[in-house]
Image (cartoon, rainbow, N blue to C red):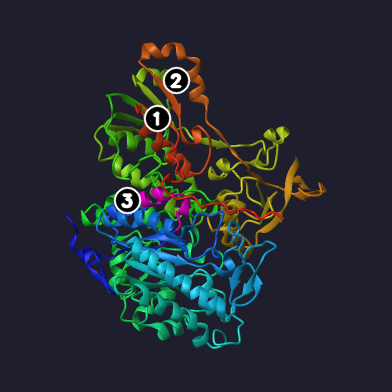
Amino acid sequence: MRNPRYDLLFEEVRIGPVTAPNRFYQTPHATGMGYTKPKASAALRAVKAEGGWGVVCTEYCSIHPSSDDSPYGFLTLWDDDDERALAVTAAAIHAHGSLAGIELWHGGAHACNRLTRQPSLAPTARAQYFVQPGAARAMDRADIAAFRSWQRKAALRAKRAGFDIVYVYAGHDYLPFQFLSPLSNRRSDEYGGSLENRARLLREMIEDTKEAVGDRCAVALRLAVDELQGPHGITSEGDGRAVVELLAEHPDLWDVNVAGYLGNDSRSARFSEEGFQEDRVAFVKSLTSKPVVSVGRFTSPDTMVGQIKRGVQDFIGAARPSIADPFLPRKIAEGREDEIRECIGCNICRSANNEGAPLRCTQNPTMGEEWRRGWHPEIIAPKARDARILVVGAGPAGLEAALALGRRGYDVMLAEAGRELGGRLLRESRLPGLGSWIRVRDHRSLLLEKHANVEIFRESHLSAADVLEVGAEHVVLACGSDWRRDAVGTFGEGLPAIEGAAAVFTPDEVFADAVPEGPVTIYDDEHYFMGGALAERFARAGRVVTLVTPHHLVSAWTEMTDEQPFVQKQLMDLGVTLILSKRLVAVGAGQATWACVYSGRESIEPAANLVLVTGRLPRRELQDALAARQEDWADAGLLSVTAIGDCLVPSSVADAVHSGHRYARELHDPDAGRPLRRERPAPDLPDYPMKEVERS
């Protein structure tokens, strides 16, 4: 039964000609699927609607071939085929009683058009936003008129496809925002100069869209009210506020956020708190009678209610929390808020789109798998037969495997060598800004307590003999991994002689507080969060810290999670010395020899305490011991031994959780191991005839 203090979240809200059934609003967010995977996209959005989100929106949807974001996953509304494909998504959302929103998009100088090879457009001639040879040309009046017609035509297609909310998109530095910002709009005609002129195109887009579809569809304006580029750009105290005042009653809904460069709108938990955008967006509601939605990685229902009661917004906007738990609204409605799978803010979801891959999530291993594997976040097939299963290790993979197996009805024993559950999460969540990562452990341990068929054995360090005596039919090894001491990493091939060096440490030893006092040198050849986070930890403890990496960026892979600029700035602000493009070639007494990755030129630098963050190796001791006694399996009733997560191959927490979940799903599944379902061109779509080439 729902807690009455959350009733406010389930009130209907009028948006122009349509009504949202509640205040839960899944704002537009990328999936990495785009126009090539319409079935997968529809299944993903359908699960959100089933989970109770009153409004479910698509990702960015291009209105014209001059806005092409290849090779990344984006939608298109260029022709009738696109309209038909997107109608599937709208219908899937409607099937569960939710409103369907579509985010019409033109990237302007942000669209490099690698697929279409059309010239990029911008208010003023400029280089494209990405480092490459191309540039964007200045739009003339004919271009602006054409652009307005593209928006109108796409809106009409969206209406015919069945969408209820159609977006005018002026956020994230895309074309309408480029007209708004004085940093990118240097025009001297009626579309440049004064704020009223710079906002002219945006006002016309809203009017055009309303005229085209406003009889049935609500028109939403997504606006970045602060581009976080200082007083010369759009700020929430200056032009951002003035734009809202100017257009206050024009759209049917305001979807507001911060934007600009460096992933400001999607900051990870490492660099922001829940509701972190409030200071810059809270003013909007006081300037308009229309409903307002914003985001802030909201996971607490009490925080959500507070947003409404304090007049910050009318809806609870969410992208990442809706990915982590598509059923978040329903759990609150049913009084199960303790079961919410809270977003940890790791931004592994952002990495998917930035890599051009389908969406993934650390907390929710079913995200992106709804269509291609048929996985549902709240429904799992019951066991096909009885079996007793031993899971060894209660890190992210083991916890997820035990929980999913328990949900299927198997008798599960979960053995953890330590006192606390969590594995690597116990250490990593102690790093600066990563406290929310422990939610991966907390969510699963709470639900495991509700399953009487799952027994948890703490402080149970098992040998091969112990495993064989348990009488389990299937053994799952989730023993984790250890950091390497041989310096083998992405760039480096290793230094065998380093093994016995007294002043060389791994992250495992850092967490065990084994690094003596004094300066610390961190060698990061792994390039995710660990090297930078350890440098920050030591620096905050007052140590003199040097971080060396063979890459030309610090924590380079965090570019994929929209964190890299924040990481590098943080370390620079803390006084960490950064040495880039150098690989480790030798270690001596209190010093290390580095070689430039380009020239090979060597240099010797002090390294009193050298911490190697280069890679990890699976803990295979138990696996190898059981393999050596395979002749005893039959007598013990043991049918299989399977390694999962980091015990199979070290990777991210998200991959570990997915590995554990997949094992549980596929146990006794006759179709286990089948290839992923892949979308292929529909046979009923017409081919475009090739034109005959005239020959002279």
Is mark 2 in CB contact (under 8 Å) with mark 1?
no
* Disc 3 element: helix
Is mark 1 in CB contact (under 8 Å) with mark 3?
no
Mark 3 or mark 2, which is nearer to you? Answer: 3
Magenta region:
30-44
The residue pinned by badge 1 equals: 672
The residue pinned by badge 2 equals: 464
Residue lying at 44% horizontally and 73% vertically, measured from the top left: 223
Please tell me which residue lies in front, 488 or 562. Answer: 562
Kindly indicate the quadrant of the structure image that contains residue 691: bottom right
- Estimate the spatial distance between the alpha carbons at disc 3 and disc 2, rounded to whole Å: 42 Å
**In x, y percent, where is residue 660?**
41, 36
The residue pinned by badge 3 equals: 47
Crowdedness near tag 3: few (<14), some (14–19) or many (≥20) residues, C-alpha within 10 Å: many
Residue 40 vertical position relative to residue 249 in the rendered view, above or below: above
- Precedes in sequence: disc 2 or disc 1: 2
Residue 38 sits inside the magenta stretch? yes
Which residue type does callout 2 highlight? Ala
